[in-house]
């Protein structure tokens, strides 16, 4: 496995839109098209959408948020993983871990020390995945989602 990240371009746009998680996970993560629309409406540099490609084939999609105003009042700025969609047939092969590590690297390069993520709680949600990577819950919620943080060291 030698995955890499690619910018979403006109040439791979349709491949990005074709990324689908398992049906039992659809309630927990927005489709790629929603993420790309959100990236478009946010100020430049806030959203960082990327296609995850391995051996020429798209296997997933991630979108990071970079230095956002977490509470909307200027008091707290955070960076982290906004969306992670690993294609249903590609799950369990390390692509999710790769995505988290890639976002962590991006945040570290920008001087950040923590990687935040939110997730829907529940039996088909990604909580076990994130906790297994070393995230800890912060005790906060964002809407109906649990907030987790990974110290990047």
Image (spheres, grey):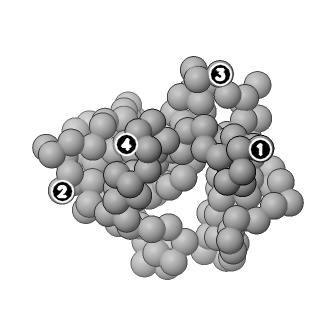
* Image coords of residue 57 (percent x, y): 24, 45
Residue with the mark numbered 3: 111
* Image coords of residue 70 (percent x, y): 68, 50
**Closer to viewer: mark 1 or mark 3:** 1
Q: Say which quarter of the image contains residue 124.
A: bottom right
For the residues labelled 4 and 2, say whether their Cβ atoms are less than 8 Å apart.
no
**Closer to viewer: mark 1 or mark 4:** 1
Residue with the mark numbered 1: 75
* Residue pictured at 67% horizontal, 41% vertical: 78
In this picture, residue 79 sits left or right of residue 30: right
Q: Is residue 33 above or below residue 41?
A: below
**Closer to viewer: mark 1 or mark 2:** 1
**Position of the C terminus by quadrant:** top right
Assess disc 1: are there few (<14), some (14-19) or many (≥20) residues with their C-alpha within 10 Å of its C-alpha. few
Disc 1 or 3, which lies upstream in sequence? 1
Residue with the mark numbered 2: 14
* Image coords of residue 101 (percent x, y): 57, 34
* Residue pictured at 57% horizontal, 20% vertical: 109
* Residue pictured at 72% horizontal, 51% vertical: 73
Distance from label 3 to label 2 (Cα)? 33 Å
* Image coords of residue 116 (percent x, y): 68, 46
SS category of the residue bearing label 3: loop
Residue with the mark numbered 4: 50
**Closer to viewer: mark 3 or mark 2:** 3
- Please give the label number shown on residue 119: none
Disc 1 or 2, which lies upstream in sequence? 2
């Amino acid at each position: 496995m030698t995955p890499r990240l690619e910018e979403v371009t006109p040439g791979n746009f349709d491949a990005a839109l074709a990324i689908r998680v398992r049906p039992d996970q659809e309630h927990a993560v927005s489709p790629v098209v929603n993420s790309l629309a959100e990236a478009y409406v946010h100020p430049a540099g806030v959203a960082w959408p990327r296609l995850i490609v391995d051996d020429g084939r798209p296997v997933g999609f991630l979108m990071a948020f970079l230095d956002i105003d977490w509470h909307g009042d200027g008091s707290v700025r955070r960076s982290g993983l906004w969306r992670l969609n690993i294609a249903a047939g590609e799950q369990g092969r390390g692509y999710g871990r790769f995505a988290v590590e890639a976002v962590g690297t991006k945040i570290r390069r920008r001087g950040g020390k923590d990687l935040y993520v939110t997730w829907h709680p529940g039996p088909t949600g990604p909580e076990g995945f994130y906790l297994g990577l070393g995230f800890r819950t912060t005790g906060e919620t964002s809407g109906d989602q649990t907030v987790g943080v990974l110290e990047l060291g």
